[in-house]
Amino acid sequence: MEPHELAIAAKYIGAGLAAIGTGAAGIGVGNLFGQFLNGALRNPSAVDGQFGRLIFGFAVTEALGIFALLISFLLLFAV
Amino acid sequence: MAGEAGSAINPIEQFSITPIIPIRIAGHDFSLTNSSLYMVIAVAIVCLVMTAGARGGPGVPGRLQSAAELAYEFIAGMLRSATGEKGMRFFPMVFTIFMFVLVINLIGLPAYTFEVTAQIVITAALALLVFLTVIVVGLKEHGLHWFKLFVPSGVPIYILPLVVAIEIISFLTRPLSHSVRLFANMLAGHIMLSVLGSFSVMLLGAGIVFKVLAVVPIVMNVGVFALELLVAFLQAYVFAMLTCMYLNDAIHPGGH
């Protein structure tokens, strides 16, 4: 195999490996909403006051998955 | 392989900065680029909406005034809950950052527009502004007592050096995570929209059976666009919220 072809293959393998991180962020976001629903069903009166915190946690957790997706995109299109 | 059609559409190309009015002063590039044009538009929109909303008038408040008051109350409430009444003197800064980022995120969303916050240099400049404000204000207000920020109270003495080292590292990496969060969300979102759009183009070029399937990425794109609308607001909110939390360290060091 030519060195150039090997580099392209490594690029695509790296992009695929980087995309695994989005699954980890998926676990995090699922955990977040699951726990929120768990707490919300126990004490429905507190839901409205904690909604901002839920969205904040979602955005911060989602950002980590986006970082992994960004590395994948950069490997695919920018390298 | 669909590499032929795919290579024609480069999802990164939309982020390239092109000069509109080239200006060179003493060998330096001061051109009006598409990036600076969109920033000027964003500032103009914010100024127009807020001045028109703050003008008031006789009788019932209109829609613009309600929108301006809503934005004001939203940020004021967030800052007050994060930093207390002492932090309200930072309100103009936090409100400016929030409105600037929000309007830039929203006007960069439609097709053929330019997303300024998908440039790391813009978000890094905003994050460094907050970071340096925290250091300067903290040192000015509290002097050397400000360094209590890195020494949490109630930690056993044998574990204290480790905790202090972790606190210092986490403080120094703040501008990095603060800027990359906004930048990466905007960049990845716009690449995603572009990639889904290129799927349609590739399917249209693939043959009669696949032409029917080309509508599927378009439907997906509508959903992703709705998500991006949410993300555009959320990331502006998170950016302003983190700004409030970091400013709290300048006002109340050692309060955690």
Image: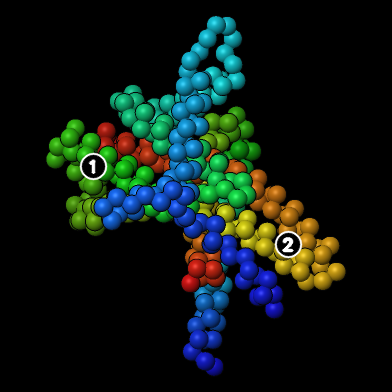
Disc 2 target residue:
B200
Is tag 2's residue or tag 1's residue first in the polypeptide sequence?
1
Residue at the extreme bottom: A1
Task: Give left or right: position of B221 versus B184.
Answer: right
Q: Residue at x 32, y 36 (%)?
A: B248
Would you place residue B47 above or below residue B229 in this image?
Answer: above
Disc 1 target residue:
B135
Viewer can see residue B120: yes
Give percent across and percent down for residue B23.
Answer: 37, 49
Q: CA distance from mark 2 to mark 1?
A: 50 Å
Task: Give left or right: position of A21 versus B155.
Answer: right
**Quarter of the figure that contains the C terminus of chain B:** top left
Would you place residue B242 above or below residue A75 in this image?
Answer: above
Q: Amino acid at mark 1?
A: Ile
Q: Chain of mark 1?
A: B
Looking at the image, which is closer to me, B41 or B245? B41
Element carrying mark 2:
helix
Give percent across and percent down for residue B253.
Answer: 25, 38
Q: Amino acid at mark 2?
A: Ser
